[in-house]
């Protein structure tokens, strides 16, 4: 069995001092590790009646696109403000020192359908929380949230409650 930890590069003090950055480009650089992640996602959500997968710019797209192709479901990109050309739903949310805003094309949200919401890594869960609000506002359900990597010591389960969160690997306080 593959040990995913072997394929995650840990970069101290990036993007700023005191942050240990878990880099997933080293998963992408290994066809074995990338395939493992996508096949695991397919296995986890096999009987969950997922109609579509949504993902957050930009690293979230990498896993969700492969998953969508693999299980033959639509992919809904959630992007930073100003990138999507059509009519959008927008949501502002707080970062550590600033505010951010994400958007989704209203027409791309399948009304009444079950959307799996994904990202590469879940830290505070703030971005996924905002993304979940967007999809619900657009008329969809979000029965599950998925991240390849989780940092549970940042308490993302609390903010994402009651939606179940699944990760392939977790890291605890550095
Ligand atoms: P958050 O909203 O706090 O869950 O995190 C937002 C995004 O920041 C995630 O999608 C991650 O891609 C990225 N991120 C946050 N912390 C880290 C970290 N320690 N290592 C790698 N990426 C991170």
Image (cartoon, grey):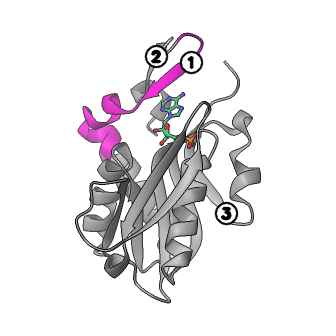
User: x%, y% of residue 31?
Assistant: 24, 40
What residue is shown with label 3? 164
Question: Which quarter of the figure is the C terminus placed in?
Answer: top right
Q: Is residue 109 above or below residue 64?
A: below
Q: Which mark is residue 70?
A: none
Give the distance between the C-alpha atoms of the residues marked 2 and 3, in whole angstroms. 29 Å
Q: Is residue 68 magenta?
A: no
Q: Which residue is mark 1?
A: 19
Taking the magenta stretch, the answer to whether it contains residue 30 is yes
What residue range appears in magenta? 17-34
Confirm if mark 2 falls within 8 A of ligand 1. Answer: no
Q: Residues within 10 Å of mark 1 (few under 14, many from 20)?
A: few
Direction bottom: furthest residue: 112
- Location of residue 62 in the rendering, given as x and y in whole percent from the top left corner: 30, 49
Seen in the picture, residue 5 relative to 130 is either above or below; the reply is above
Q: Is the CB atom of the residue marked by disc 3 within 8 angstroms of ligand 1's nearest atom?
A: no
* Disc 2 secondary structure class: loop
| Label 1 CB less than 8 angstroms from ligand 1 | yes
User: Residue at 33% of width from left, 45% of height from top?
Assistant: 58
């Amino acid at each position: 069995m593959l040990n995913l930890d072997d394929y995650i590069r840990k970069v101290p003090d990036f993007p700023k001092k005191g942050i240990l950055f878990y880099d997933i480009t080293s998963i992408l650089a290994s066809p074995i590790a990338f395939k493992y992640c996508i096949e695991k996602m397919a296995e986890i959500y096999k009987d969950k009646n997922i109609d579509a997968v949504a993902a957050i710019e930009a690293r979230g797209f990498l896993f969700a696109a492969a998953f969508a192709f693999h299980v033959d479901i639509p992919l809904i990109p959630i992007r930073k403000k100003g990138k999507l050309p059509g009519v959008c739903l927008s949501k502002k949310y707080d970062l550590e020192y600033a505010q951010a805003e994400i958007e989704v094309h209203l027409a791309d949200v399948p009304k009444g359908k079950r959307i799996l919401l994904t990202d590469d890594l879940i830290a505070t869960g703030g971005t996924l929380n905002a993304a979940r609000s967007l999809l619900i506002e657009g008329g969809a359900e979000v029965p599950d949230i998925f991240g390849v990597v989780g940092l549970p010591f940042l308490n993302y389960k609390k903010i994402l409650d009651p939606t179940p969160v699944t990760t392939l690997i977790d890291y605890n306080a550095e």
